[in-house]
Amino acid sequence: MSGTTARRAAIAASVAAVALTSIAACGRSDAGESPGGDATGTVADTATGEIEIWAAAGNGDALRTLGEEFTTENPDVSITVTEIPWGEIITMNQTAVASGTGPDIVMTGADQTASVIAMGGLAPVPDGVMDVDALYPAAIASVTGETGLYSVPWYVETRFLFYRADIAAELGLDAPTTWAELEELSTAYATRPGGEFGFGLPRPIENPAQVIVPFTSQAGGAVADEDGWTFDTPEFVEALEFYQGFFERGESPLSETEATFENGGSPMFISGPWMVGIYEEMIASGAAPEGFTQESVGFVPMPAGSANNNSYIGGGNLGVFASSDNQESSWLFLSWLQEDAQQKKLFDLTGSFPARQESADYQPILDSPVMTVLKEQMPDTVETPSYPSWSQIAEQIGIYAERVAHGELSSQDAAKAIQAEADSVGFGW
Amino acid sequence: MRTTPPRSGRLVSLTARRRRTAAVAWLFAAPFVVSFGVFGVVPLVSSLGMAFTDLRVTDIRNPFNVDFVGFENFVTVLGDSTFQRALRNTLGFVVFGVPLSLFSALVLAVMLNALGRRLATVFRVGYYTPVVTTIVAVAVVWRIMYQPNGLINSLLATVGIDGPNWLGNPLTALPALTLMAVWRSIGSSMVIFLAGLQAIPTEVKEAAAVDGATTLQSFFRITIPMMTPTILLNAILTTTGFMQFFDEPFVMTNGGPLQSTTSIALYVFNQFQWGNYSVGAAGAYVLFAIISIFAIVQFRFLRQRT
């Protein structure tokens, strides 16, 4: 019996010793190390070998088709594409970075890129791959790490205002162009006979930061500068108050509701171009309520605050994985995807709006009413803060915005609280 | 103890044989020991170690290139207002959910035990179905039932009660999720209770009946005392499961409204999502400590009576 105890003690001691040695081996050796990949690479003249791509869901086919075209120009290369669900992208990259084995090219959402840069998952973009001046500035911001550029914007998307044009016409009101007109239309919608809500804003679990950041910009502010987060500002408070007003007046639903855009209960919201397709399908399939037609769906650029009408910008970025052994060919492919012809082809394939500004002057885009609005909105966009800690900060904004919406907390106190949380988290590089 | 006489030559060979037997035993146990070591002990020890470092998303390429920060992460976790809220919610969920779940399961088990075999099987399958159903599918149905004019409020309306917006109201969201979790967990506790009930010898009850004990007396004086080990097992299993409250808020409310359904497990999950691995690990070990305390208390409390 005592022998077993002694042996157990010995085993426990050795396990503890191993654990302690591994802890003792810890310690930050070099504080100056850049979070991204290694030294900047170069671009190949002709692509060779295999290029493996992780594409975000819904983009696999487009990349395959474009990849085949690229292969005819570069016969020595072969491209394989794997689709990854949007929600899995961060986890997949974490695992790939930790194990040091991954694909050659990874696609990230504009709001995810910074996190993958912070992991050290992406290689810095070599000179000559992208023409920074040709792309939308907010898209460039989303691929900028602490020390440089780490991905290539492939397509962009933005949000604008959807409103029930038919109901607005009945009420004798036009599409709103300013905050005051937006509030007026919202109140008119909600107080009309049979009306329920006026303006459906994202609820706390729907990431309200994606409207509060643009509202802050519209009020003339910004949520961060080079030194840190700036939430405790008059502009941010103004944005929160504007957001809160719709809830206070009962014009925006605080919880799940059966009021929808098509049944007229919630006749206004902010979203992206895909909603047009959803409503078209709804009308074509006969699922839409009576009286809801194509003419009912109005969409216009965001109404302006005191400073501008900046909207949210998102999009898809493509980067080269830091541990890829075929970086030079991968950069050539990404550089090729940036060219005007491929950017237009992308629009043909998926309807995604090109990241290259001049490619937007494309007849099918100009012919589409929704793309015209998108094109009009694109120059007036504010980048989502491109920092690794953004998703955590956005969650805090959601928590405090909800308390403000419920009237539990004043906008000033919420701004101070978010500032304190954000200061303790930092940018996360 | 020893049956063979102590003869020196035989003793040596016995020790040798015993040693050989031990070696063979270890050989047979090796697949388990090695796999448990690699996939069990190493992650456990490293996650505990992680809780005392400042490992973040930026460190995953060099996970050993981090600093030892002592209990700083635990201070961060315990000082975080979201964690405190999550702790209150989780404890409330456990304090109300576990007794409700155990009591309902016991009542159902006693009722099923009194039923005929075939009928009991039908009901057993029925009550066990929620346990094996995917939460995602169940969540859709429950969300529809909890809607302001969903099934539950329609039922309440027939008796003249104006039901609340269950998942949208910060006061009712946690009770609503508790009810759903109880519904999901009853089946497994019930099956264990049923097995416990069936293990009680009928002679004991017959003897009590002969002595003139009423049904109620025999339930509280015989059934419950003989079921104590089963109740202890179920209490620990259910409490451990309920402390890890995650699925319901994750798919139904995402912790809202006003953080009224956020839980410790959800907090830990979010910290990992945000790349604060060491803070997440510290939160997980706080949860582990609370679960251990609950288990120890239940052991002490229920073991005395057996």
Image (cartoon, coloured by chain):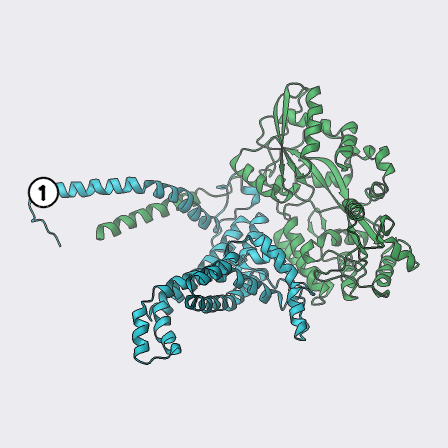
Question: What is the x, y in percent for residue B278?
Answer: 52, 50
Question: What is the x, y in percent for residue A213?
Answer: 74, 52
Q: Which of B84 and B260 is in front in this view?
A: B260
Query: Label 1 crowding class (10 Å Cα cut-off): few <14, some 14-19, many 20+?
Result: few
Q: Which of B244 and A394 is in front in this view?
A: B244
Q: Nearer the viewer, residue A71 or B109?
A: B109
B5 versus B171 height, above or below: above
The chain containing the residue under callout 1 comes to B
> Amino acid under label 1?
Arg
B41 versus A197 height, above or below: above
Q: Considering the numbered disc 1 on the image, is that residue within a helix, a strand or a loop?
A: helix
A59 versus A285 height, above or below: above
Question: What is the x, y in percent for residue B193?
Answer: 41, 64
**Residue designated by label 1:** B10
Q: Residue furthest right?
A: A172
- B4 relative to B98 in the view: left or right: left
Q: In which quarter of the image is residue A253?
A: bottom right
**Chain depicted in cyan:** B
Residue in view at x 9 percent, y 42 percent: B10
A89 versus A185 height, above or below: above
- B46 relative to B156 in the view: left or right: left
- B140 relative to B245 in the view: left or right: right
Q: In which quarter of the image is residue A187?
A: bottom right
Q: How many marks?
A: 1
Which of the image's four quarters has the C terminus of chain A?
top right
Rendered shade, chain A: green
Is residue A185 visible to the viewer in this orientation of the structure?
A: yes
Residue in view at x 31 percent, y 47 percent: A11
Is residue B290 visible to the viewer in this orientation of the structure?
A: no
